[in-house]
Amino acid sequence: MSTETTPDLSRTARLDRLPFTRAHGRLLTGAGVGWALDAMDVGIVSYVLAALAVQWELSTGELSLLGSIGFAGMAVGAALGGLLADKVGRRQVFALTLLVYGLATGASALAGGVAVLLVLRFVVGLGLGAELPVASTLVSEYAPARIRGRVIVVLESFWAVGWIAAALIGTFVVAGSDDGWRWAFLIGLVPALYAIVVRTGLPESVRFLERQGRHAEAEAAVRRFEASAGVPAPAGAGDRAAVAVTPAARTAAPAPRVPVRELFTAALRRRTVALWLTWFGVNFAYYGAFTWMPTLLVADGFGMVRSFTFTLVFTLAQLPGYAVAAWLIESWGRRAVLVTFLAGSAVSAIGFGLAGSVPAILVAGIALSFFNLGAWGALYAVTPESYPTAVRATGSGSATAFGRVASILAPLVVLPLHDRIGTVGVFVVFAAAFVLAMAGSALLAELKGRRLEEDLPTA
């Protein structure tokens, strides 16, 4: 790719034409570590619930509430986090979310009963829900257009790292003693410390800075990425930066905030509905299955340690799922990858429900994890791409929030459903949710290779 500069290129165009640089790598890793810590917290809960079901002798209703209350917080957090990120900045909200859920997770270790743990898990959910759409928006707005989908799938792959960490903590810490679940929650304090790194080490979105009239900061951010690629600033860029720091520029009014109802105008309605359907189906099936996987395995006669070990094996399959999705997303396209991986998830869910032997359980569980998490990667790639800058975080947050409604419902209904229709019936329900997500993803526009500023297609 040519690295010659053109004087009249906009800052975002200058970012889009760069190769993937060390600066991109630092941003991706920095956001990815936060993503992994988020996954670790969500994953730990599935093991804690299996332990508390025995230790606290919890009823099905109490377990269901504990399983879903965090997702209720995530629904609220996703909606508020997107709004805040479009108003005060992606980096600021990202750091705040890490601090909130890290402190609340650490405090959960001291919980002495269900009521206190419910409150703390809701607060944890507020932070977790806000982080994911904000982090993906920030990385998406820096990634070069031709590889943006792949970069976001790689970001999403950090989820597998966090979930693997949770599986290891569950297997060796939670199952190790009666107080193992408390030590697991104490480990969850790490995100609060990492918030400092995010606040000081990651750049703010150039697109956000420009909308706020902070042009000097935007220019400085672009130049850091150009310097990382060995590309000099375009002729005239210095003049534009100088103009940007004049008193008039400092006091320039930021662009007006676009209301949430903009998501349902004629230009955006179809992609909003498509994304909401997809997010709802994927959330219901994923969190319904993986939140209760250890508990369902125990209920089907496997011991706690063996169930945790099986879940660890399933989790390891997430990494190749992300890798294949990242490889395919820039050749097949977002929509094709989503539909294919969701179809694979539906078939795998039915296979898991019907599995009657340990080898069959392992094969179906590995396939379910592979396809499901590959679909997650593609979904996180296409979501921020589907909206213009003014409502990008809001649109991503609203889709995530609607999906969290499903993640609230799933933990509430899975155990009662299991009592009535068994493991086979429950996983058929999950397969149906994947089919719903397929229908939504089929309605999405194909956005492979498009710059974020371009007019988005409607089909």
Image (cartoon, rainbow, N blue to C red):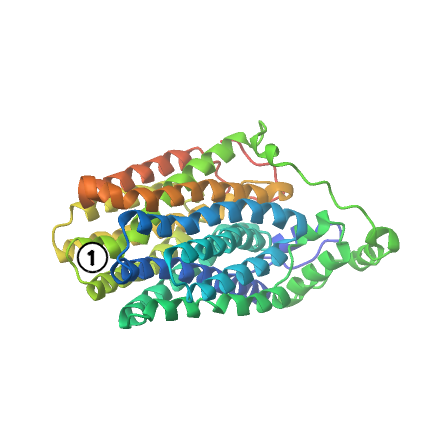
Residue at image point 48% right, 33% down:
273
The disc labelled 1 sits on which kind of residue?
Val
- Image coords of residue 104 (percent x, y): 49, 61
- Image coords of residue 397 (percent x, y): 53, 45
- Image coords of residue 184 (percent x, y): 38, 68
Question: Does residue 8 appear in this view?
Answer: yes
Using the image as rendered, state which of residue 106 and residue 257 is in the foreground: 106
Question: Does residue 344 appear in this view?
Answer: no
Using the image as rendered, state which of residue 226 and residue 305 is in the foreground: 305
Using the rendered view, name the quadrant where residue 250 is placed: bottom right
Q: How many marks?
A: 1
- Image coords of residue 354 (percent x, y): 16, 45
The residue lying furthest to the right in this view is 247
Apparent side of residue 2 relative to residue 329 in the rendered image (left or right): right
Using the image as rendered, state which of residue 145 and residue 182 is in the foreground: 182
Q: Which residue is mark 1?
A: 298
The residue lying furthest to the left in this view is 357
Residue at image point 32% right, 38% down:
433
Dot 1 lies on which element?
helix
Using the rendered view, name the quadrant where residue 99 is placed: bottom right
For the N terminus, which image quadrant?
bottom right
Apparent side of residue 303 relative to residue 50 in the rendered image (left or right): left
